[in-house]
Image (cartoon, coloured by chain):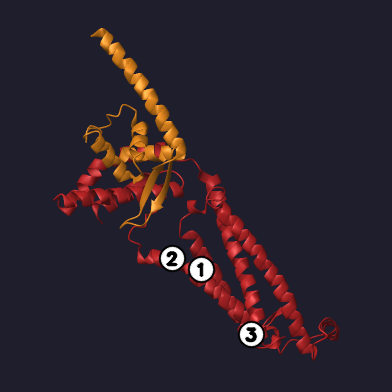
Amino acid sequence: MTAIDEYVSALADRLRGPAIYTHRVLGEVEAHLQDASDALVQGGWAPDEAEREAIARFGDLKTVAAGFNRDAPSGGAALTLRALVGAAGLLVGVGLLTVGVSAVASYALSRITSPQQVFGLPSHASVSAASCAHWLAVQPAATGCASAAALEARDDLTMYLGALGVVGALILALALVLRTRALPVAALSPLLVPTVAVTMFAGAAVALAVLGVTDARIGNTWGQGMWFVQSACALAAAVVAAYPLLRSFRGAPSAPRQAG
Amino acid sequence: MKGDRTGGNLDLLILSVLSAGEAHGYEVIRRLRDASEGEFDLPEGTVYPSLHRLDGQGWLSSSWDSSGPRRRRVYALTEAGRAQLADATAAWHRLSLSVNTVLGARA
């Protein structure tokens, strides 16, 4: 660990205020010290000596931390709560939007293949005569009970899940508009939302794949192809959410550290 | 490093050096030192809280700049900051004139 790393880490331990503030301070201090050290090295200083001199010119830790803490914005629990609401809005919005996208994808797949391959009743499902009569009544183009069940499932699920997608898009748009001021998601640890999102979407992908493999029926929801499409959409969302985590693990060279 | 010799006028000086164009904190400190011919060679860590305060007051705007080899927070004077700089500069000249007048009267 270099002298600058040690100084920034020690400063992180002394800083108070919301994470969005300490994140900014530490990023600025680190960049400043590295700039100052680089300038000294260019002036002929040895790198180790240059770092120590840059730190000395910046000021002693106690005084510097006190200066930052004196002007630290108050926020505390209220800010964190608003940030959590914003993060929840983002996650719920993305989740519902993914549901909507999977509904459209399932519908498209059913047009390419057949409604029964995507929305077909499980072969082991028991169906009452009354249900069959109902499906055949509302799906006059169906050739039989199984065909009617698949067409009815396709129409209903596409409509309901698609509507959820529209709601998700609206929530997401609202959360994005409000996230910098009213719902400051950036006040949270930058890895929190991606970590929750990856866990949520990867878990959903596995669960939906299990439903697909077992050709499950949950109430009026069924369709082996649909479960697999939803699983694939959830997996895609998990991969997208994992991107910031992968960047972090690789160690972006100038990423500011978080306060301890 | 000579300690803070700005006489409590650091905010005014920061607004003034930023009127020449946006800059990150390290550059602000360098401009202060160069423009004062070394007189305002401040403990560098003391400048950032002032930058943050001016940013919070709306006299500066700031954003991260990732175009260089490392990410820096860049500050720019806002219209409100420009107006504040004009007011504070006029007030400083009035004060300076008054002080000089009093000192001159004693000489």
**Front position in the image: B95 or A102:** B95
Check contact, mark 1 vs mark 2: CB within 8 A.
yes
Q: Residue at x 58, y 65 (%)?
A: A94
In the rendered image, what is the letter of the chain coloured orange? B
Check contact, mark 3 vs mark 1: CB within 8 A.
no
Residue A27, given in percent of the width and then of the height, sits at 36, 51
Disc 3 residue crowd, few under 14, some 14–19, many 20+, Cα 10 Å: few
Work out whether B92 lies above or below A260: above
Work out whether A76 lies above or below A170: above
Q: Residue at x 61, y 67 (%)?
A: A97
Work out whether A72 lies above or below A251: above
**Front position in the image: B107 or B11:** B107
Residue under label 2:
A245
Single out the mark in the foreground, 3 or 2.
Answer: 2
Chain letter belonging to callout 2: A
Disc 1 residue crowd, few under 14, some 14–19, many 20+, Cα 10 Å: many
Residue under label 3:
A214
Type of amino acid at the residue the image marks with label 2: Leu
